[in-house]
Image (cartoon, helix red, strand yellow):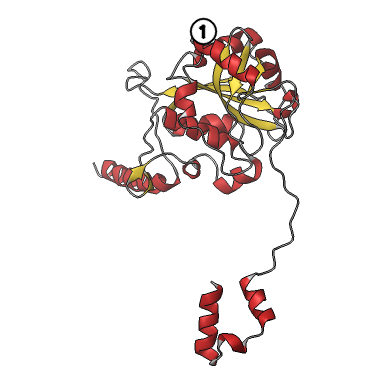
Amino acid sequence: LAGTFMQALKTLSGYTMHDIPKTTLDTIARPALAKPTASFYKRPLPPKCTSFTSSRGKEMFANALLEGNMEAYFPLASQFITQNEPAYCGLGSLVMILNALGQDPGRRWKGPWRWYEQEMLDCCRSLQSVAETGISLTEFTCLARCNGLKADVQPAPMGIDKFREDVKLASRSSGTFMVLSYSRKSLGQTGDGHFSPVGGYSEAHDSLLLLDVARFKYPSYWTSIEDAYEATLPLDKVTGQPRGYTLLSPVEPNEYSSTSPSVTTISLNKSTWKLFQIKMNNALRSLSSI
């Protein structure tokens, strides 16, 4: 870059490299770095959380694998991502689930390829708004449904036995996944509201594995069912609504039978809504002319 700049100077002004003082060259070649601002590199896990990569974490994984409670882990691990923005934990978690389930977004990611990425999840709230405040459990469910998933939302308090039962259900399946909405503070972590996919369950330790999409902050970790359940109980300070979890699975072709003909699921986003609106307007005009 400095060489190109110097050539431009030579062409425009008739200068040669020797005509320019060394101090000037130094300034061009090595621009002053901006003053550093406060920044962070990760956080240590609190005592309530066991790192997935620790000796104990590996032992828990091995036990859970033998129990048959790690079926969810493999499809999720193959799609593990980091959230794109500090408040995108809900979007990052949902994109992992959508791609793990093999959902077709119906629009291009890059080149000819159709693939889910976080900026596609804009059908319930603007991405700018989500980047500022994150999303609630209700909005997470809205995003899941408008992208073609069946979402069984369980707001807290649902009872610890029900919670454990659903953790086990999701952990033993590669077609139904759980995303937990919880308070980090309850686990002794920094920050507060967060979303994470559940990657498995160790019955021997009565603990679940959280695949934290804020990988710049915390690694994946195990925490007890009791502590995880307690973390769903604090209210979301933004909405005043409870936290909880959502069980996500694909909508089957015959999910809505003739017994409920008025129920229709439409997967729309900002990019496809205008096209849908045009087609609906044309259809309505055709009907009105009959």
Q: Residue 97: x, y in percent?
A: 47, 29
The residue at the far bottom in this view is 14
Residue 243 left/right relative to 70: right
Residue 224 left/right relative to 139: right
Residue 274 visible? The answer is yes
* Residue occupying image coordinates x 71% and y 35%: 43
* Residue occupying image coordinates x 56% and y 10%: 63
* Residue occupying image coordinates x 43% and y 19%: 174
At label 1, the amino acid type is: Glu
* Residue occupying image coordinates x 65% and y 31%: 194
Q: Residue 216: x, y in percent?
A: 63, 39
Quarter holding residue 31: bottom right
Q: Residue 90: x, y in percent?
A: 57, 34
Quarter holding residue 37: bottom right
Q: Residue 251: x, y in percent?
A: 39, 24
SS state under label 1: helix
Residue behind mark 1: 67
The residue closer to the viewer here, 41 or 21, is: 21
The residue closer to the viewer here, 41 or 166, is: 41
Q: Callout 1: few (<14), some (14-19), or many (20+) C-alpha neighbours within 10 Å?
A: some
The residue closer to the viewer here, 227 or 264, is: 227
Which part of the image, by quadrant, shows the C terminus? top left
Residue 110 left/right relative to 45: left
Residue 248 visible? The answer is no
The residue at the far front in this view is 18
Check the image and report above or below for 73 versus 161.
below
